[in-house]
Image (spheres, rainbow, N blue to C red):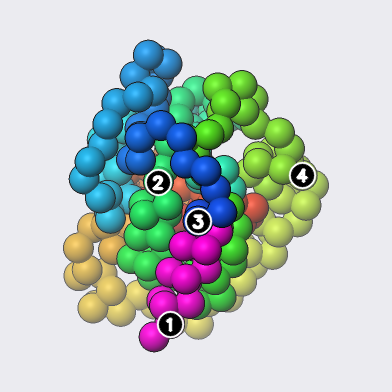
Amino acid sequence: MQFSFLSLLLALGFGLCVVGGGAGVLGHEPQSNDNVNNNENQVDLRGLAENARLPNDPKGFNHIGDDGILRSFNEEGEVIGYTRLTHDQLLDIIETSPWSPGKKEYLAQQWSAADSPQVSMEQIWQPPKGLLPLRFAEPERFRLKREQQQQQQQQQQSAKSPTVSLMLKPLPEWCKRHMCYRHEECKFLGCFHCMFYSQLPYGDCI
């Protein structure tokens, strides 16, 4: 099956990491909540983000970095909240998404070495350039890719209109099919947040 490769890839990557602390650890502001235990396997990304109760800037977005940390960024690129994701949660995010096989394989490779319990507080709040979303790591490259993506989206929208079956999907599924760059765009559609992944130049509403 298609997902067997993804599961094996992530399992091998995480197997090389020495896991410290408890698995399923959630951390967010304030920092004293860093060791709150999460025993349930979170399959739904929207539910996970809601439970984390991260602070958010309407013009900012959430981002899952290659270190397994889900960070909330404000418009200026500052980290204002975070959640540690386990390897099971990362795998579930990939497998339950409506993404293309190519995008799933890319994220499986990017997240294969993530070990969030070992990430320091300094790295969480001040991630190096290699862990930043493309928007802040390479602004010019982000701008060019955003323009390309918007042109492609306009062409697709002019070629066909949303089908009735897509419009009748439950809200979370409907949201996942909308590209976004900031929270306020998703809120306008009745969705929760805008989520970016690794170095991808655009996010998805959740």
Disc 3 from disc 1: Cα separation: 21 Å
Residue 162, position as x, y percentages in the image: 35, 75
Picture disc at residue 13: none
Label 2 Cα crowd, 10 Å radius (few <14 / some 14-19 / many 20+): many
Q: Nearer the viewer, mark 4 or mark 2?
A: 2
Q: Earlier in the sequence, mark 2 or mark 3?
A: 3
* Residue name at image x 77 percent, y 44 percent: 138
Asked whether residue 1 appears in the rendered view, the answer is yes
Disc 4 on helix, strand or loop? loop
Which of the pair 137/202 is nearer the observer? 137
Q: Are marks 2 and 3 in contact (CB under 8 Å)?
A: no
Residue at mark 2: 86
Q: Earlier in the sequence, mark 3 or mark 1?
A: 1
* Residue name at image x 55 percent, y 22 percent: 121
Question: Which amino acid type is marked by label 1?
Answer: Gln
Disc 2 on helix, strand or loop? loop
Q: Nearer the viewer, mark 2 or mark 3?
A: 3
